[in-house]
Amino acid sequence: MSGNQEIKIQSMTRFYILLLLKSRKIITGYQILKALEKDLGTTASPTSVYDFLKDLKSKGYVKNATKSVGERAKGFKLLPEGEKFVDRIFSRFNNLIEVAIQSKLHMCASCGVRLYDDYHSETIQGDEFHFCCKHCAMAYKNSQLEED
Ligand SMILES: [Zn+2]
């Protein structure tokens, strides 16, 4: 890794590894591989995972650690600088996720609340409208009638 260049997090695998490092005190490369397989359904290549961990280590973001005395240092532990790095990445992704969710959301045409999975749709004068409930649909139709 060259000097000041920030490590790029361009894959879900890397993002998830950071999540794992943050959520556990110490984690081994093997546990990371298992978790990726179990939670993401991806079989990450051990080499790419260990290379990434090596990059994080060279940046001073993680260090080798053991869970118990006498164990060989196979685990990894996030260091304070690493915590900051992970927080930076997370806040960036947070914004993206927020945008992605919002673009999929509908709003109740009557009261304006956000609609998730369970909502009421009605076709009014050829256009489809979404509402949080039948009452809002009714209120909306009534208000439309008043305007005519
Ligand atoms: Zn509503």
Image: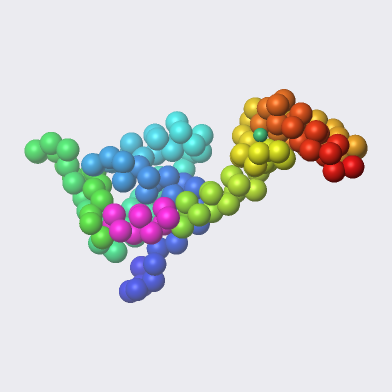
Is 146 drawn above or below residue 49 in the view shown?
above
Going by the image, does 55 lie left or right of 140?
left
Residue situated furthest front in the rendering: 146
* Residue located at (39% from left, 71% from top): 5
Query: Can residue 64 be seen from the camera position used here?
Result: yes
| Foreground residue among 145 and 56 | 145
Query: Can residue 57 be seen from the camera position used here?
Result: no
Q: Position of residue 116 (x, y in %)?
A: 62, 34
* Residue located at (70% from left, 26% from top): 135
How many numbered marks have been drawn onto this rendered protein structure? 0
Q: Picture quarter containing residue 119?
A: top right
Going by the image, does 67 lie left or right of 19?
left
Q: Position of residue 73 (x, y in %)?
A: 18, 45
Q: Quadrant of the C terminus?
A: top right
Q: Quadrant of the N terminus?
A: bottom left
Residue situated furthest top in the rendering: 134
* Residue located at (40% from left, 63% from top): 7
| Foreground residue among 57 and 12 | 12
Q: Picture quarter containing residue 36?
A: top left
Q: Position of residue 72 (x, y in %)?
A: 16, 42
Q: Main secondary structure of the magenta part?
A: helix
| Foreground residue among 148 and 29 | 148
Is 2 drawn above or below residue 23 in the view shown?
below
Q: Quadrant of ligand 1?
A: top right
Q: Which residues are magenta?
A: 82-91
| Residue 89, magenta (yes or no) | yes
Residue situated furthest bottom in the rendering: 3
Residue situated furthest left in the rendering: 69
* Residue located at (42% from left, 45% from top): 16
